[in-house]
Amino acid sequence: MPGFNERIQAALEQRRRDDLYRQRLTLESSQGPTVRVEGREVLNFCSNDYLGLAAHPEVVAGLCEGAERYGVGSGASHLVCGHSAPHHALEEALAELTGRPRALLFSSGYSANTGTLGSLLQKGDSVFQDRLNHASLLDGGLHSGARFQRFRHSDVPHLEHKLAGVTEGEKLVVVDGVFSMDGDVAPLTDLAAACRRNNAWLMVDDAHGFGVMGPGGAGSVAAAGLDVDDVPVLMATLGKALGCAGAFVAGEAPLIESLVQSARNYIYTTALPPAVASAALAAVRLLTTEAWRREHLEQLIRRFRAGAEAVGLPLMASTSAIQPLLVGDAGKALELSARLRVAGLLVGAIRPPTVPAGTSRLRITLTAAHSEQQVDRLLEVLAEEAAQVL
Ligand code: PMP
């Protein structure tokens, strides 16, 4: 009888044959517009460090000061004795920034999503998810015990049709604010209106909008002019625009308190290191004082799109920092990524199951730390290499 070893080997070999094998890089530098890989400086167009804060001196100082004062490990879960002053101050700053009464820290976005959905939903409820939602939302919904339905990407009439078909239990609609692999923004105003009409709550995962969009970087929900009544459950991560790690959920006090009391991923896990909270506080301060980062990023996005259009590159319809170039075939996406690497550019090839079959792509991300010259270099190399591969 074949055992685990044979099965593992067969699955790995199949992955290789399908061009779906994933390879890790080992960085020898901090995040930034350039990174060091295998002893070589390369231009980095694949990180989510959208504002260039991951290695910002003030964020690093926040971490160091936090570690000097509070040590490294938080020592326990939040409800035992792991909740410290920097966690508390960060929660208050995030609540204020997002215009919500309370915010609650989680150790990761994955954990925040699965924990929140698991706590909020019960058997008999229904959860409706955009089919391109992040894996953590899909997993949280699938494991919640609620009836799970997907609707076509950003198709509000399709959602509404599904909502209208449910007459029992609570209804929760869940979307990414900015879709992580496509870069497009969810139709939040229409979604909120559909939820209102159908007595449903809306949850937005703003991992890729928070810090980058909206007034003061408050995110895609604030950018759409929506508040806590429109979007009662707002989740965002601290590992992207804020350049740190962790995540939070913000909302009315009873929702947040119910997560404290019953979200298993909150209760049964060690709190983030307090120094990380202290670093994130420094990053939040930079969001408000350095609006130029968002403005510069906006300008680079426009420059990149105009340049790509001029040379006929198959960009997807995105106005965010995520600018995917549609390739289709997984092997070709890998080949293009490898060619860019040889030319000194780091851009990841995203393949199934992360994206639907036949839609493999290069996920190009721009950040406020890039210069115009670096974006021009990206365009130049892309035009040359895409002509060889596509
Ligand atoms: N939601 C979205 C939309 C994401 O893109 C990610 C990160 N890839 C997560 C949640 C998970 O966040 P984290 O990396 O903090 O676990």
Image: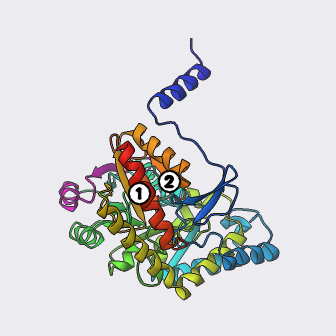
Specify whether residue 157 is painted magenta: yes
Q: Check contact, mark 1 vs mark 2: CB within 8 A.
A: no
> Residue 220 location, x and y as percent?
38, 73
Q: Is mark 2 on a helix, strand or loop?
A: loop
| Stretch of the chain drawn in magenta | 143-167
At label 2, the amino acid type is Val
* Residue at point 56%, 67% (across, down): 260
Residue 228, how many percent across, how many down?
Answer: 38, 78
Q: What residue type is labelled 1?
A: Leu
Q: In this view, does 309 lie to the left or right of 321?
A: left
Q: Which of marks 1 and 2 is in front?
A: 2
Q: Residue 347 carries which label?
A: 2
Question: Residue drawn 41% across and 76% down?
Answer: 298
* Image-based side of 302 in relation to 5, left or right: left
* Quarter in which the N terminus is drawn: top right
CB of mark 2 near ligand 1 (< 8 Å): no
Q: Depth check: give the residue in front, 274 or 117.
A: 274
Residue under circle 1? 121
> Mark 1 vs mark 2: which is more N-terminal?
1
Q: Residue at x 51, y 58 (%)?
A: 46
Residue count near mark 1 (Cα–Cα under 10 Å), binned few <14, some 14–19, many ≥20: many
Q: In the rendering, at what x and y percent does residue 188 appear?
A: 30, 70
Instruction: Tell me the tag on residue 210.
Output: none
